[in-house]
């Protein structure tokens, strides 16, 4: 990937480097103003809370994707993993509330396991992650259709759906706070802490220059594998929230991998690794979600939406890319 | 210049052909046991047609991947090209050449945009071509509700359905395109430069290669190939089809074919002959499973495994040879 | 400098694409543009008045054939002679299937397999090839099937126009061809089996919603995808009905069949307009998600249409919704097998073979709601009398 020569010597410097979260904050602010002009009550606490709650799964996926991308890899399997998890959950729970917690646990293990396989195949067998996770994508989608004979079966219990669908009522000042938002806050805090720990710095260093990292005693393969496991875990949590929010369907995770990667890049994280922050990635996802809401509020014709989305992504990334390269 | 001469553009025939031969042999046997015939005329023709469509795209994809880039917009370019061609022809043979020219020109325009975004604006190829794909998707979605236009009968009869023995004309076109691309990669300056850029952009620049120009050219050629695939599909379908590219998964399948064929996704290593092998391998798996009436979802699982396994084998070989 | 260039390029591109699509057909209304308060903008360019009139007339036509077997019924049939295809059995039937990638097609295909089983020894072999939603593959598949000694070929085309050359080639090979679901633009198949169609579907839902909601109220139209012929007809018929009823269509949105996206859209519209008085959908896949969005926002669920998927019928019954379910019945997958066998017997068949398209209403809801079946099963499968029911569909 480009700019090998310019890469920083010390990973510590990365956090202070500009071009981090400022551009995405600016874009977010612009969109918020636009939404506010059109739909002032969107910014009231109750609706803002519900917006954040429903955006939580996508933001979590962006955080998971961030770990992988900043370490210099890709994870194209997250969307199919979410679909698989939701369909598996519905069939295993089969509307029986007693099975809720065991299945939640199982989903987390399943997510971590898929991440582990992705990571090991990528690092130990040296298959580029684009291919590993593309293959995993095909395998997961095929397997889940095969297992369920082409149509989801069973159903999610109300207890399972609570995480993604219900809210903690009567919170002072804020009113309703969706459980999904609480989950998001906890995971986001963990993610930020993790990135500030030694592991976080190692992860960025590995993405920045694997050879240097290797020479300074880092086990690159292990670090990257952990990144994939984190992504799998994030997908599991996202699947639990998403299944709760909207129920069972084969469409549950469709296209989420591209959404997550776009969000991460929009948040100022460089594909190829080594640059950007997890906060930026999550803000990127939030921005994308806000963009979709904005198009709803402004009544942008449905068929043209992908054009608008494409143009904004290209514009944002081109602007920040040319900006950072002119420094 | 010494760095350039160290990077051979041509490599020995990749192992994908061994895999292909094995697959066909095993497939033939299994189908025979099942009571069928893998190599009857109809099946062979079908197989080669499927391979021709994917192959035309994959040859172009090989060029950008060799250069260290990627094109995720090809599926939309294909759909657009079928529509431009079929609507311009509108069922008349007279408009055949202008229509083909226009379809290729439009495709080249998209390639130019991709190339400029990747080079001038330094947008990562993944995002750039994904974004351009979204732009095209919006255009197609809002303007078409299904097939439109009519391909000229002459094109349908020739490129679409004409064959020489069991070999369709379109497959011969693929072979010709492969030959030309092989020549360009191994015998021309553009080819050497492209491989150099894909191998190490910094070294290439220092040795005097104009990286941007080379990459833009590769992107234009890739889109041209996709456009050509679109024209072929229009001749096959008899009209333009706004979803044929995406439904055919030509974006991901073409990348899969390229890497199965032994080209490194990071660029700088591989070749177009292997890609054709990869395409034939995917088409053969398709044909065998078709004969056995295997569930499509199971087939998808197998595809996923094959893709990963193939690349793992290449990586292992490269490691053993120390060819990094 | 570069940044400006980038911005300029992207803006130009955006405006270019926008200009190229300035006709409002693809995305009418758009909410804010409906200043007059009614009317959904220009009619879609995909609308064909004659087809619309014909389909609406069929909705009221009385079918011929056994009343308890709608899959054998015909609307306004014109019979064609098939004596030249007469052949001694048992027969080898071949089926080129567009795809199996959604629950509707899954239920339909299982129904077809059961019909084949029910025919017993009359069918010696049933060959099925799945094109996985790819035109190119289906053309190759049909060509491939022609080399397999089939007695009759059944085709469910992936797209209308593009499969025409392949189907023509099959006709030329001399075996009887039966096309169903989507048609092809050639008259060469012996018969084309399908229900009334998209205009009928869209009309039934829209008329119900506009009659039950408060006059002049706000309707949200939820569609799956733009640019798919069978879905475009549903919407353009609904548009006619809504314009006639003078209701205010505040939005036409695409959900991609994704329940999460559906809930977000409904949420945003509830926020924007306070209340929504009616919801129209072009397919039932996300009907339950739309209902949930109202429930989660603490709003009453307005008159809504879904489809015959059991999850929707169940919510309808449990929550006492004001709802209707026009159908695109999966029992049409039985008919091609029956038609092929009749043709091989030399019996006359209708061409086109128009099947009735029943609607599930409050009155007959209980008849179709079978809580024992999976949530995405289609009630109108006409499969309860087939071998293996209900296990085969579970």
Image (cartoon, coloured by chain):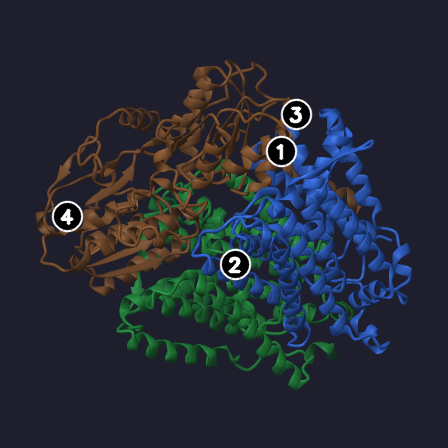
Chain colours: A blue, B green, C brown
As helix, strand or loop, the secondary structure at mark 2 comes to: helix
| CA distance for labels 1 and 4 | 52 Å
As measured in the structure, the alpha-carbon distance from the residue carrying label 2 to the one carrying label 1 is 30 Å
Residues at circles 3 and 2 in contact by the CB criterion of under 8 Å? no
Tell me if A100 is positioned left or right of A17 in this view: left
Say few, some or many: other residues with alpha carbon within 10 Å of mark 4 (under 14 / 14 to 19 / 20 or more): some
C47 vs B212, nearest the viewer? C47
**Residue B304 vs residue C157, the one in the foreground:** B304
Can residue B192 be seen here? The reply is yes
Marks 1, 4: nearer the viewer? 1
Mark 2 neighbour class, 10 Å CA radius: few under 14, some 14 to 19, many 20 or more: many
Helix, strand or loop for disc 3: helix
The subunit letter for the residue under badge 1 reads C
Disc 1 or 3, which lies upstream in sequence?
3
Q: Which residue is mark 1?
A: C296
Instruction: Return the disc, 1 or 4, that comes first in the chain's sequence.
Output: 1
Q: Position of residue C305 (x, y in %)?
A: 45, 30
Q: Decide: marks 1, 4 in contact (CB < 8 A)?
A: no
**Image location (x, y in percent) of residue B305:** 52, 70
Residue at point 34%, 56% (across, down)? C139
Q: Is residue C270 left or right of residue B272?
A: right
Q: CA distance from mark 3 to mark 4?
A: 56 Å
Q: Chain of mark 3?
A: C
Give neighbour class at mark 3: few <14, some 14-19, many 20+ (Cα, 10 Å): some
Query: How far apart are the alpha carbons under marks 3 and 2?
Result: 36 Å
Discs 2, 1 touching: Cβ within 8 Å:
no
The residue identified by callout 4 is C342
* Disc 1 versus disc 3: nearer the observer: 1
Q: CA distance from mark 2 to mark 4?
A: 39 Å
**Residue A141's mark?**
2
């Amino acid at each position: 990937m480009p700019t090998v020569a310019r890469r920083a010597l010390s990973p510590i410097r990365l956090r202070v480097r500009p071009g981090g979260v400022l551009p995405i904050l600016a874009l977010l602010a612009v969109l918020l103003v636009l939404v506010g002009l059109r739909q002032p009550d969107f910014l009231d606490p109750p609706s803002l809370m519900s917006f954040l709650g429903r955006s939580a799964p996508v933001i979590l996926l962006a955080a998971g994707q961030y770990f992988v991308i900043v370490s210099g890899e890709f994870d194209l399997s997250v969307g199919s993993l979410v679909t698989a998890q939701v369909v598996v959950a519905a069939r295993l729970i089969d509307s029986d509330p007693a099975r809720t917690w065991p299945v939640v646990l199982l989903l987390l293990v399943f997510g971590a396991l898929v991440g582990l396989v992705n990571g090991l195949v990528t690092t130990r067998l040296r298959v580029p992650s684009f291919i590993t996770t593309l293959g995993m994508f095909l395998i997961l989608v095929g397997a889940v259709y095969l297992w369920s004979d082409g149509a989801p079966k069973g159903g999610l219990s109300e207890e399972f759906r609570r995480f993604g669908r219900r809210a903690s009522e009567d919170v002072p000042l804020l009113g309703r706070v969706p459980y999904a938002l609480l989950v998001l806050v906890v995971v986001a805090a963990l993610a930020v802490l993790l990135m500030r720990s030694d592991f976080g710095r190692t992860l960025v260093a590995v993405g920045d220059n694997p050879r240097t990292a290797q020479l300074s005693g880092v086990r690159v393969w292990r670090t990257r594998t952990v990144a994939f496991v984190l992504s799998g875990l994030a997908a599991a949590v996202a699947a639990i929230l998403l299944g709760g929010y909207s129920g069972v369907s084969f469409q549950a995770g469709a296209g989420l991998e591209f959404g997550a990667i776009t969000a991460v890049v929009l948040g100022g994280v460089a594909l190829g690794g080594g640059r950007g922050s997890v906060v930026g990635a999550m803000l990127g996802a939030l921005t994308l979600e806000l963009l979709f809401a904005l198009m709803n509020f402004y009544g942008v014709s449905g068929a043209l939406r992908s054009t608008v989305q494409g143009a904004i992504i290209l514009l944002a990334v081109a602007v920040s890319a040319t900006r950072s390269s002119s420094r | 210049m010494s760095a350039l001469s160290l990077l051979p553009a041509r490599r020995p025939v990749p192992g994908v052909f061994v895999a292909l031969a094995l697959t066909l042999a095993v497939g033939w046997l299994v189908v025979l046991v099942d009571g069928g015939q893998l190599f009857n005329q109809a099946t062979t023709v079908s197989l080669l047609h499927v391979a021709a469509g994917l192959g035309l795209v994959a040859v172009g994809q090989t060029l950008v991947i060799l250069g260290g880039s990627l094109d995720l917009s090809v599926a939309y370019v294909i759909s657009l090209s079928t529509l431009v061609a079929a609507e311009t022809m509108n069922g008349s043979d007279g408009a055949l050449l202008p229509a083909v020219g226009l379809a290729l020109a439009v495709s080249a325009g998209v390639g130019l945009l991709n190339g400029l975004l990747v080079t001038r604006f330094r947008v990562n190829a993944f995002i750039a071509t994904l974004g351009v794909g979204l732009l095209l998707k919006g255009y197609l979605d809002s303007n078409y509700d299904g097939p439109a236009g009519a391909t000229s009968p002459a094109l349908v009869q020739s490129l679409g359905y004409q064959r020489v023995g069991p070999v369709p004309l379109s497959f011969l076109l693929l072979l010709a395109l492969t030959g030309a691309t092989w020549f360009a990669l191994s015998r021309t300056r553009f080819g050497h430069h492209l491989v150099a850029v894909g191998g190490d952009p910094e070294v290439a620049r220092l040795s005097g290669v104009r990286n941007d120009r080379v990459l833009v050219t590769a992107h234009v050629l890739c889109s041209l190939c996709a456009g050509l695939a679109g024209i072929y599909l229009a001749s096959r379908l008899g009209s333009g089809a706004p979803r044929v590219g995406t439904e055919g998964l030509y974006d991901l399948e073409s990348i899969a074919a390229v890497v199965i064929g032994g080209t490194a996704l990071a660029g700088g290593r591989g070749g177009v002959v292997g890609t054709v092998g990869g395409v034939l391998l995917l088409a053969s798996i398709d044909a065998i499973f078709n004969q056995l009436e295997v569930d499509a979802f199971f087939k998808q699982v197998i595809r996923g495994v094959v893709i990963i396994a193939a690349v793992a084998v290449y990586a292992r070989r490269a490691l053993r040879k120390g060819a990094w | 400098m570069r940044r400006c260039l980038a911005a300029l390029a992207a803006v130009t591109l955006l405006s270019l694409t926008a200009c190229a699509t300035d006709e409002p057909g693809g995305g009418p209304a758009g909410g804010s543009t409906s200043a007059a308060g009614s009317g959904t903008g220009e009619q879609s360019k995909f609308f064909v008045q004659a087809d619309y009139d014909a389909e609406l007339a069929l909705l009221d036509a009385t079918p011929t054939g056994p009343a308890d077997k709608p899959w054998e019924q015909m609307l306004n049939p014109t019979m064609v002679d098939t004596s030249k295809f007469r052949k001694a059995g048992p027969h080898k039937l071949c089926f080129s299937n567009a795809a199996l990638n959604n629950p509707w097609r899954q239920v339909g295909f299982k129904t077809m397999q059961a019909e084949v089983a029910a025919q017993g020894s009359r069918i010696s072999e049933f060959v099925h090839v799945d094109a996985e939603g790819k035109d190119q593959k289906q053309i190759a598949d049909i060509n491939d099937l022609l080399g397999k000694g089939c007695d009759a070929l059944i085709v469910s085309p992936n797209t209308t126009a593009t499969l025409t050359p392949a189907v023509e080639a099959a006709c030329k090979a001399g075996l009887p061809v039966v096309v169903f679901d989507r048609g092809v633009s050639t008259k060469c198949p012996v018969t084309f089996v399908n229900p009334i169609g998209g205009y009928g579907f869209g009309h039934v839902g829209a008329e119900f919603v506009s009659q039950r909601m408060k006059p002049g109220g706000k309707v949200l139209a939820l569609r799956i995808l733009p640019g798919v012929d069978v879905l475009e007809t549903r919407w353009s018929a609904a548009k006619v009905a809504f314009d006639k009823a003078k209701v205010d269509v505040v939005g036409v949105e695409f959900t991609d069949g994704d329940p999460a996206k559906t809930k977000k859209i409904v949420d945003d519209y509830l926020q924007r307009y306070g209340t929504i008085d009616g919801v129209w959908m072009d397919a039932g896949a996300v009907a339950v998600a739309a209902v949930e969005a109202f429930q989660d926002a603490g709003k009453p669920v307005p008159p809504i249409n879904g489809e015959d998927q059991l999850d929707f019928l169940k919510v309808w019954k449990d929550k006492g919704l004001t709802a209707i379910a026009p159908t695109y019945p999966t029992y049409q997958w039985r008919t091609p097998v029956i038609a092929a066998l009749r043709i091989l017997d030399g019996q006359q068949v209708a061409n086109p073979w128009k099947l009735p398209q029943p609607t599930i209403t409050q009155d007959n809801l209980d008849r179709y709601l079978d809580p024992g079946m999976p949530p995405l099963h289609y009630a109108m499968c006409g499969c309860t009398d087939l071998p293996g029911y209900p296990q085969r569909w579970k």
